[in-house]
Amino acid sequence: MKQKTLFLLLAISAIYFVGCSDDDDSNWDIVPSDVRSAFEEKYPSAKNIEWEDKGSYKVADFINDNMEASAWFDSKGTWYMTETDLPFNLLPQPVKDAFGASEYSTWKVDDVDMLERKDSEVIYIIEVEYKNKEVDLYYNAEGILVKTVEDNDDNDYESHIPQPASTEIEAFIKEKYPEARIIEIEKEKGRIEVDIIHNNIGKEVVFDTNNQWLYTLWDVRVSSLPQTVAGVVNDSQYAGYHIDDAEFVETSQGNYYLLELEKGNSEIDIKVDENGNILV
């Protein structure tokens, strides 16, 4: 009888220590109590939780609703961002429809992420690849393409943590782009990049560090280019090239199209004004 009782106690202890070891593997020791409380309140059903420090943030990698996710908190427990690996079929229908109608619809879908951020719209990022090119497509829930970015294999999205807009920037955007919605603000390489949605078009408004406007650009489908602009590839100096990508750029000095021309493994960028004149 004593042997059976001892065996039972050992079995219970083993179960207890397995549970504890799982918790220890989660690195809860680096997590302040405020962060732990905030996380458990926001994700009560989270499983397989592992914590790590990233800069000044506490980041939890976990499973939620059978999907992998990462949530970012500051040391006081304020939530800033969650990135979730999303199956393509769970994308909002407007996003799937917009992607299906895009020039990237025939590209291979490599990954899909949902980006939720404090005081910001939810963004869906579809990573696509074709031959040696990889592009991230940023859509909002309405299916509006906010921007396209060449994939750099950096998928923790730390640069997407919400940044506040200065009073000067907000005032400029309100005046130049009435009723625009600010989607994201990034500060990098000595510039401030503000992604907005204006007239159902995703635009990137770029400022210097003194909040002075430099330019605004947005993607243009090659098939939608004015013929005067698209016709530049008929110029003898661009013989054999085709237009692979196009953007429209607004500046205080004038507007132009930025065209990426491609021929085999060769790529060049040229600027063309709205009348089809090539700018030096």
Image (tube, helix red, strand yellow):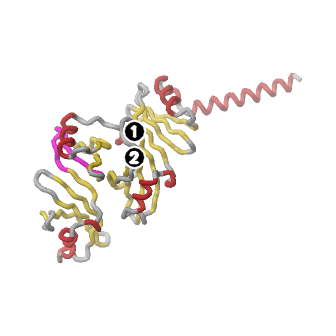
Kind of residue indicated by mark 1:
Arg
- Placement of the N terminus among the 4 image quadrants: top right
**What secondary structure characterizes most of the magenta part?**
strand
Kind of residue indicated by mark 2:
Ile
Q: Residue at x 38, y 34 (%)?
A: 55
Q: At which x and y percent is residue 88?
A: 49, 54
Q: Nearer the viewer, residue 12 or 76?
A: 76
Q: Which residue is mark 1?
A: 117
Residue 279 lies left or right of residue 35; in this view the side is: left
Q: Which residue is mark 2?
A: 123
Q: Nearer the viewer, residue 279 or 202?
A: 202
**Mark 1 vs mark 2, CA separation in Å:** 9 Å
Q: At which x and y percent is residue 241?
A: 26, 73
Which mark is first along the chain, 2 or 1?
Answer: 1
Instruction: Determine contact: label 1, label 2, CB under 8 Å.
Output: yes
Q: Residue at x 22, y 58 (%)?
A: 248
Question: Alpha-carbon neighbours of circle 1 within 10 Å: few (<14), some, or many (≥20)?
Answer: many
| 211 within the magenta span | yes
- Placement of the C terminus among the 4 image quadrants: bottom left
Q: Residue furthest right?
A: 1
Question: Alpha-carbon neighbours of circle 2 within 10 Å: few (<14), some, or many (≥20)?
Answer: many
| 249 within the magenta span | no
Q: Residue at x 50, y 32 (%)?
A: 42
Q: What is the magenta range? A: 202-215
Q: At which x and y percent is residue 2?
A: 86, 22
Q: Secondary structure at mark 2?
A: strand
